[in-house]
Image: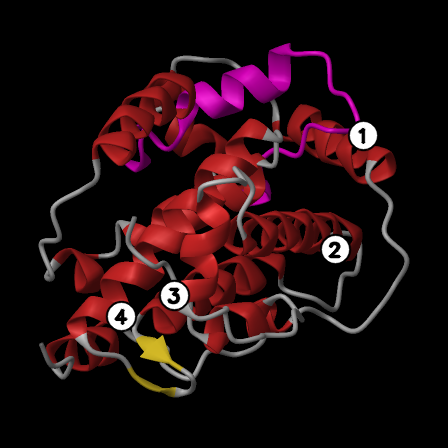
Amino acid sequence: MKRRRLSSDGFKLFNLAYTQPPSYSVIKRFLFCMHHTEYDDQLEKMVDQCRNASKQLYMLHNDKSIDINRLTNNAILNLIYSMLCKDEHLANRQQVRRNMQYYMDVMEKAYDTEDHNTAISIKNAIDHSSLKTFKFKPRKKDIEFAKTFEERYGTWRTCWGKHLKEVMHSQICEEYIPSLMVLNMHRERNKAYANLVKINILPQDIEARIGIIRNLNPLIAEDRFPLYEEPPVQTNSDLFALAQSVKT
């Protein structure tokens, strides 16, 4: 079994402390008698913090002084940047691969726990053209999950229309956190997207649904997650340049 390690950059986005993983010899001794590894523990902590970050985004939605669309865009750019870095320095190709695989695992766990805000944000980051330039061969599990993902959400080409339909026609429970990016996109450009998703939903209906989700997922005000701060790299051309600088 290959060692899996994430750099500290990803943890910092979600206010998680980073600890060095145990040595390979220690891991090897325990793998034969334990199914739950330290990697699983780190993954669970990250998924929990991702959920809190999603709740915080909904909590901030009513603040008219905050540009929510800018925060969601910041999150995607920060995720891309963290995949290209290791401990605040540019990663090498193998480290980028590990970071991307880690976030793919987070995305799948978020999907399983109904945190669709996190799942779609990570999907947007992973599919960014700067990361596509690496042409990493996907794992079998990633190929299978990609099919499940598309069947439920649709794609960016269809403006995640399947997800919108699900959100608007399903009974919302506390565990269910839809993508605020998708809801805002359709609320603000309702006429432009209505024919594409072939569904007649009024902007005020989407706004009402956002309010329900916000009330079901309260989060005590705290410092904003670093995930939403202004990213170190803010343009596609700069991300491309950074990706091109990654060494093998």
Q: Which mark is residue 212?
A: 1
Give the mark nearer the N terminus: 4 vs 3. Answer: 3
Residue, x 10% and y 61% (percent of image)? Answer: 133
| Mark 4, secondary structure of its residue | helix
**Residue 78 percent coordinates (x, y):** 45, 70
Please rate how many residues cluster around mark 2, counting C-alpha atoms within 10 Å: few if below 14, some from 14 to 19, many from 20.
Answer: many
Q: Is residue 244 above or below residue 134?
A: below
| Mark 1, secondary structure of its residue | helix
| Residue 75 inside the magenta-drawn segment | no
Residue, x 35% and y 24% (percent of image)? Answer: 154
Q: Amino acid at mark 3?
A: Tyr
Q: CA distance from mark 4 to mark 1?
A: 40 Å
Q: Which mark is residue 183?
A: none
Residue, x 37% and y 46% (percent of image)? Answer: 104
Q: Amino acid at mark 1?
A: Ile
Q: Residue furthest bottom?
A: 89
Numbered-mark total: 4
Q: Amino acid at mark 2?
A: Gln
Q: Which residue is mark 3?
A: 24
Q: Is residue 42 left or right of residue 221?
A: left
Q: Which residue is mark 4?
A: 95
Give the mark nearer the N terminus: 2 vs 4. Answer: 2
- For the record, the magenta segment spans 155-184
